[in-house]
């Protein structure tokens, strides 16, 4: 296939290799054509080159006087024409001018000059193909410089290597052949370089083999990880002797090139002398520490000049700290009252050279400790004090022991019992003041071998270590012989365990015997009194079990003393009363309150008797409940009189009711007649009489209610109802009875209750009329009502005369009225509150009062909520 000239030209222009077609005429070597790659390499344009001589198109750099580039190029052209073969011109410099400037860019080229022949074989043109090798040229130039620098550096490194103050060696390959060693490592190993180089290191150092060094070297060679060893023991033969040498060393990987580890560099320093010195120092320190620990000492080093302190951990512990502290922290722990004492001790130490004082310190937990601090002052060459070295000892236990000893001696000296110490021959070494008085002695020297050192007593003491028993002794002054209780103990030597002394404590039994006799006499007298008492007496323990009854109860029950104990006393109580008796007794025990109950018994004479039992709770010396002491009184006659009185009141009230009703009717008729006749004054007198008859009717009604209550005949018609409407209606009705007082309702929502509505109305009327009556100077009464849990609570609050604390406990008693001057101020029989209380109790509620004298009262009652 033929290629046209145009196609050939396209191939030439787009060739990636720079090409320049030059005329073969030697006169000018004119440029015939140039491809794109050449233009790019020389940063020129085709129009500026075609037809020009190659040397005029690319002039020489005027400052380059050494390259002679044109001469070299001409020679290459001539050589190509002469041989008719391509000629290569290697790495010649030919700078390229920078367009628009007089500057040149330094360039290096490798060019091929290829001759082109005509049909006659003559060279008609030359293809000049330059290749820019500037980067390669400079790279090789830098490499040569680097090689030279490395050679110089190696010389320097070798010099440093050989003169290094530490031992250095290079061991190559898996056998660790010694490649290089410096004099210092030769000295450490005890070998010269000739003995080591070229040999496996462990053949040179056989005693180091099998000590783990091979594994360490292999690990570094394989992984490239550095290993450091400190104060490692190495067995080496030096000067013909096997020595234990201690070295610090570093194993570093030795790289043959960037990625290949060919061996290990060993850097080692012998530290045998340092290790041995440190061991001796540690041994000395350990001996000192053990000595200090043995006596529980803390040690310190105080710099007098700057106040810095170095302490042992035990020193800090004695001050109550876990770890060592700054000097100021130790100072702050000293008791404020002892700070001045410390200051004086330091001043004296600087003067005398020695320090010794005791002080109190306060631990972080605020506990107090005692310490003894000793020290020696260290001076410099100019005899100036610079440091204090010393110890600290916790003497808290010693101080406490001394205090305890002092207390014990004081206690023994002030004891009321004889206390003494004798040696094993019976010679006394100590006897307290009470003992001297008991024996009637003026001095211990006059005390002879006491009677309690009888052979059998001494034998028992030596064998068993103690002896105790009663014996008779005599007073040396009066000659009186009297009983004592003697308690002897053997005192042994702490080291040998042999008996060395006897301690004796003797108690005079005369007061005890007298007290026992007096107690026996007192108990006999009490038994005689209780036997003769008309009232039954009893005692119980904290569980409620009866532990004592007197003869009176035994006579009432007809049972023996033992049969009445624990719960046997219940056997004579009527079954219908027993439940209440037991329930109230259990409640009293639980609440530790006074016990008060009435009940009937089957008397030993065959009749029924009424009794009232009262029990007072008892407490021991530490305030714990211990049981009851009580009495039981026969109130049969009182009950009979009460029944007679109730019967009389009932009959009298009933008999009075009819004539009073008639009188009331007559009074009302007469009032109307007198009004019609215009006799207003007489009619007003009849109206007042009617009012008094109303009061009399109310009193008669109260007496009848009391009679019914006491006889159990008061009728109740219970039903479910809401309290609030009833209470509001009563408040409205009673508001008309008083012009001075405002009745204020303070009601909260409540549930329903189940009770006798009329009886509850009577209670409310009683409480409201009392509130009006007993607050003559007040202007309001507040009626409260609310539900608390399962109770409806009603309170009638007045601001009247109030009730004293003594009176408050009795206001709900039958016929009880205010005592003193107030008794005649307010009318009534004292039955309203009693009747109210009995009604409320009957429906399962509670009634109580809160009051302060001269400030007012609030009477409360509660009713159960119906569910």
Image (cartoon, helix red, strand yellow):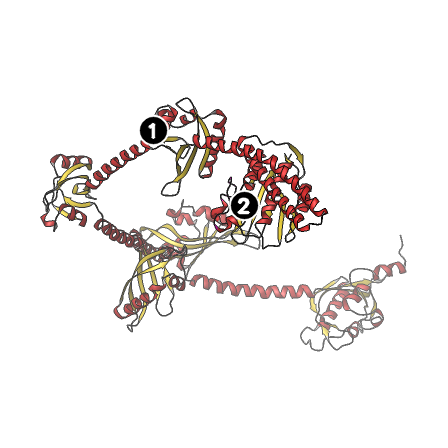
The foreground one among 263 and 23 is 263
The foreground one among 244 and 829 is 829
Residue at the limit of the structure toward the top, as seen here: 606
Which mark is first along the chain, 1 or 2?
Answer: 1
- For the residues marked 2 and 1, what is the alpha-carbon distance in whole angstroms? 41 Å
Quick check: 619 left or right of 770?
Answer: left
Examine the image and state in which quarter residue 706 appears: top right
Looking at the rendering, the stretch of residues picked out in magenta corresponds to 809-820
Residue 82 part of the magenta-drawn span: no
Q: Which mark is residue 551?
A: 1
Examine the image and state in which quarter residue 367 appears: bottom left
Q: Which residue is mark 2?
A: 849
How many labels sit on residues?
2
Q: Secondary structure at mark 2?
A: strand
- Residue 700, percent from left and from top: 58, 38
Q: Quadrant of the C terminus?
A: top right
Q: Which mark is residue 848?
A: none
Asked if residue 783 is positioned above or below residue 124 in the image, the reply reads above
Examine the image and state in which quarter residue 315 appears: bottom left
- Residue 495, percent from left and from top: 20, 44
Tell me the crowding category of disc 2: few under 14, some 14 to 19, or many 20 or more residues within 10 angstroms, Cα based. Answer: some
The foreground one among 727 and 286 is 727
- Residue 587, percent from left and from top: 48, 35
């Amino acid at each position: 296939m033929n290629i046209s000239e145009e196609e050939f030209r396209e191939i030439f222009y787009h060739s990636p290799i720079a090409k320049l077609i030059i005329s073969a005429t030697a006169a000018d070597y004119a440029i015939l054509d140039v491809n794109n790659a050449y233009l790019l390499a020389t940063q020129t344009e085709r129009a500026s080159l075609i037809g020009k001589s190659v040397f005029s198109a690319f002039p020489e750099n005027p400052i380059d006087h050494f390259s002679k580039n044109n001469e070299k190029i001409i020679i290459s052209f001539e050589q190509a024409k002469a041989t008719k073969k391509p000629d290569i011109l290697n790495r010649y410099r030919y700078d390229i001018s920078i367009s628009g400037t007089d500057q040149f860019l330094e360039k290096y080229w490798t060019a091929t000059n290829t001759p082109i022949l005509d049909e006659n074989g003559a060279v008609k043109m030359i293809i000049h193909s330059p290749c820019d090798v500037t980067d390669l040229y400079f790279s090789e130039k830098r490499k040569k410089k680097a090689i030279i620098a490395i050679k110089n550096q190696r010389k320097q490194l070798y010099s440093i290597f050989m003169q290094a103050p530490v031992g250095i060696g290079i061991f190559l390959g898996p056998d660790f052949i010694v490649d290089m060693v410096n004099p210092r490592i030769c000295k450490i190993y005890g070998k010269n370089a000739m003995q080591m180089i070229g040999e496996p290191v462990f053949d040179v150092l056989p005693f180091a083999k099998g000590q783990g060094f091979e594994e360490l070297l292999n690990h570094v060679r394989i992984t490239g990880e550095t290993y450091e060893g400190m104060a490692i023991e190495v067995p080496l033969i030096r000067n013909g002797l096997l020595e234990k040498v201690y070295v610090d060393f570093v194993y570093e990987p030795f790289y043959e090139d960037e990625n290949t580890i060919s061996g290990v560099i060993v850097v080692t320093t012998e530290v045998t002398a340092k290790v041995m010195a440190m061991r001796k120092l540690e041994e000395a320190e350990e001996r000192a520490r053990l000595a200090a620990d043995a006596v529980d000492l803390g040690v310190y080093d105080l710099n007098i000049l700057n106040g810095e302190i170095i302490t042992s951990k035990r020193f800090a512990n004695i001050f109550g700290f876990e770890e060592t502290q700054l000097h100021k922290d130790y100072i702050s722990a000293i008791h404020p009252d002892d700070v001045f004492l410390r200051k004086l001790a330091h001043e004296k130490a600087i003067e005398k050279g020695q320090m010794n004082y005791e002080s109190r310190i306060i631990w972080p937990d605020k506990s107090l400790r005692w310490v003894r601090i000793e020290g020696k002052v260290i001076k410099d060459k100019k005899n100036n004090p610079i440091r204090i070295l010393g110890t600290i000892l916790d003497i808290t236990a010693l101080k406490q022991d001394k205090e305890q000893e002092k207390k014990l001696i004081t206690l023994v000296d002030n004891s009321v019992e004889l206390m003494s110490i004798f040696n094993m021959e019976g010679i006394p070494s100590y006897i307290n003041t009470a003992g001297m008085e008991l024996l009637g002695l003026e001095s211990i020297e006059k005390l002879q071998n006491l009677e309690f050192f009888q052979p059998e007593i001494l034998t028992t003491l030596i064998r068993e270590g103690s002896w105790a028993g009663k014996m008779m002794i005599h007073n040396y002054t009066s000659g009186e012989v009297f009983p004592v209780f003697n308690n002897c103990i053997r005192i042994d030597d702490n080291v040998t365990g042999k008996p060395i002394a006897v301690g004796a404590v003797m108690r005079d039994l005369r007061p005890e015997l007298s007290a026992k006799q007096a107690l026996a006499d007192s108990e006999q007298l009490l038994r005689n009194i209780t036997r003769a008492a008309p009232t039954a007496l009893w005692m119980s323990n904290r569980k409620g079990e009866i532990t004592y009854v007197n003869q009176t109860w035994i006579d009432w029950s007809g049972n023996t003393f033992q049969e009445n104990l624990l719960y046997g006393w219940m056997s004579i109580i009527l079954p219908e009363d027993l439940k209440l008796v037991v329930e109230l007794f259990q409640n009293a025990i639980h609440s530790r309150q006074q016990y008060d109950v009435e009940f009937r018994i089957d008397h030993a004479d065959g009749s029924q008797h009424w009794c009232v039992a009262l029990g007072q709770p008892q407490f021991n010396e530490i305030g714990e409940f211990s049981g009851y002491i009580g009495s039981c009184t026969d109130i049969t006659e009182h009950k009979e009189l009460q029944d007679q009185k109730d019967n009389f009141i009932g009959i009298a009230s009933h008999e009075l009711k009819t004539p009073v009703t008639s009188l009331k009717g007559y009074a009302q008729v007469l009032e109307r007649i007198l009004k019609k006749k215009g006799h207003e004054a007489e009619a007003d007198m009849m109206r007042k009489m009617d009012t008094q008859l109303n009061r009399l009717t109310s009193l008669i009604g109260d007496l009848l209610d009391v009679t019914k209550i006491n006889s159990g005949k008061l009728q109740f018609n219970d039903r479910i109802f809401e309290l609030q409407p009833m209470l509001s209606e009563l408040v409205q009705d009673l508001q008309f009875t008083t012009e001075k007082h405002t009745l204020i309702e303070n009601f909260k929502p409540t549930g329903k209750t189940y009770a006798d509505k009329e009886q509850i109305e009577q209670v409310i009327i009683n409480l409201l009329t009392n509130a009006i009556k007993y607050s003559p100077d007040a202007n309001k009464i507040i009626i409260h009502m609310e539900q608390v849990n399962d109770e409806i609570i009603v309170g009638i609050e007045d601001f009247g005369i109030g009730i004293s604390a003594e009176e408050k406990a009795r206001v709900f008693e039958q016929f009880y009225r205010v005592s003193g001057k107030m008794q005649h101020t307010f009318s009534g029989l004292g039955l309203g509150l009693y009747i109210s209380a009995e009604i409320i109790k009957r429906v399962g509620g509670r009634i109580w009062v809160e009051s302060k004298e001269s400030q007012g009262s609030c009477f409360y009652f509660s009713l159960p909520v119906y569910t």
